[in-house]
Image (cartoon, rainbow, N blue to C red):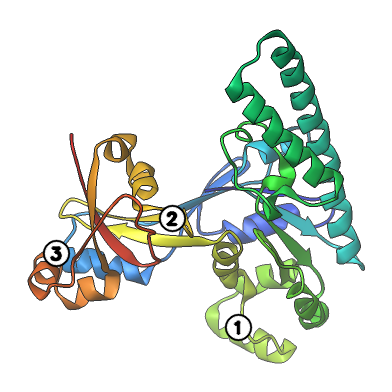
């Protein structure tokens, strides 16, 4: 999962990038952060896995000249705002996305219509009808993420209003609670807001633990909010996690809510999806309490599911497939 951070100069976007990726593996404008996961630890321990692989998230803080291209290629966007009126900035940015996307879709429809006039292809006609509906949605001022998934006709177009987005409101700590209340209203499909005082958070996280506690008490800060960001991101992006335990390796993999077993298999490897036979599934707690695969099978808690099974958060899965 690749997050692209963007914002106007002096908003604190690079400081926010540094805050999020302080424990990550950083190279130039990119950092990879491994997500702590106690469930993964428990599952791997029971299975006595030689290796455990947590979810890795990539954060990109591109230079201004590369910002748009990176945003179009990202999985999700982080919009950093530092303003007396962040709601105005959010509205302005969403309107810019709509205009950009409308230009792209309009151009695509025009090209396809010309092609259709030369060859009457049913699949082409279907694509044109779909994109006309997308165009109408944009013309109504509705962001695409509210209406569509990244379907095949939309893939590769770099539509910004289709991307999941979190608006990061960077404010002084005395205004955090005020904007936090407002942020709760900035929600919807694949959209949300996160409020943080980046400068104060940096000072806290760079301080020794004892000094940090004293500073938090002095300023009335109840929690280090940066640590809550990943939780917010998973909620906004509608992500869940499933696990694939084994002696050699236990992996955690992130997928969107509503993902089927067949699609989850493809997340591991396309060959597993192509040769899919069935999924052997149980909840991670059942797996741990039963002592691993053998115990789950003996207890009768292992379920056999087909390709249309909708994966649940915390599922432990073994995929059977034709090699």
- Residue 129 shown left or right of residue 291 in the figure: right
Q: Nearer the viewer, mark 1 or mark 3?
A: 3
**Residue, x 31% and y 59% (percent of image)?**
243
Residue shown at 67% from the left, 85% from the top: 215
> Mark 1 and 2 residues: CB-CB less than 8 Å, in contact?
no
Q: Position of residue 207 (x, y in %)?
A: 60, 74
Circle nearer the N terminus (1, 2)? 1
Q: Label 1, on which residue?
A: 211
Q: Secondary structure at mark 2?
A: strand
Vertical placement of residue 306 versus 45, above or below: above
The first of marks 3 and 2 along the sequence is 2
- Where disc 3 sits, the SS reads helix
Residue 254 is tagged as 2
Q: Which residue is mark 3?
A: 293
- The answer to whether one can see residue 9 in this image is no
Side of 273 relative to 156 (left or right): left
Give how far apart the Cα atoms at labels 1 and 3 are: 46 Å
Quadrant for residue 98, please give it.
top right
For image coordinates 14% across by 64% down, the residue present is 293
CA distance for labels 3 and 2:
21 Å
Q: Residue 179's x, y, as percent? A: 80, 76
Dot 1: few (<14), some (14–19), or many (≥20) neighbours within 10 Å? few
The front one of 49 and 278 is 278
| Residue at image location 68% in from the left, 36% down from the top | 130
Quadrant location, the C terminus: top left
């Amino acid at each position: 999962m690749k997050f692209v951070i963007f914002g106007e100069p002096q908003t604190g976007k690079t400081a926010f990038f540094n805050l999020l990726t302080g424990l990550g593996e950083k190279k130039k404008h990119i950092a990879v952060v491994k997500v702590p996961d106690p469930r993964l630890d428990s599952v791997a321990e029971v299975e006595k896995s030689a290796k455990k692989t947590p979810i890795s998230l990539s954060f990109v803080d591109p230079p201004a000249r590369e910002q748009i291209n990176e945003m179009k290629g990202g999985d999700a966007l982080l919009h950093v705002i530092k303003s007396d009126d962040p709601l105005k900035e959010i509205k302005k940015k969403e309107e810019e996305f709509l205009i950009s996307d409308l230009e792209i879709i309009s151009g695509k429809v025009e090209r396809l219509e010309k092609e259709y006039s030369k060859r009457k292809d049913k699949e082409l006609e279907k694509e044109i009808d779909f994109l006309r509906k997308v165009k109408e949605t944009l013309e109504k001022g509705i962001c695409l993420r509210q209406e569509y998934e990244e379907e095949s006709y939309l893939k590769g177009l770099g539509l910004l209003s289709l991307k999941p987005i979190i608006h990061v409101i960077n404010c002084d700590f005395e205004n955090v609670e005020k904007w936090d209340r407002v942020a709760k209203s900035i929600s919807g499909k694949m959209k949300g807001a996160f409020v943080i005082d980046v400068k104060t958070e940096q000072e806290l996280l760079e301080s020794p633990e004892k000094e940090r506690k004293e500073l938090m008490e002095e300023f009335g800060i109840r929690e280090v909010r940066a640590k809550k960001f990943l939780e917010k991101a998973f909620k906004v992006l509608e992500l869940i996690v499933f696990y694939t335990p084994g002696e050699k390796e236990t992996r955690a993999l992130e997928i969107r809510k509503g993902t089927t077993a067949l699609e989850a298999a493809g997340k591991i490897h396309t060959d597993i999806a192509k040769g899919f036979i069935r999924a052997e599934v149980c909840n991670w707690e059942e797996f741990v309490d039963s002592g691993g695969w053998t115990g789950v099978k003996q207890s009768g808690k292992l379920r056999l599911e087909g390709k249309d099974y909708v994966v649940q958060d915390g599922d432990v899965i073994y995929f059977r497939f034709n090699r």
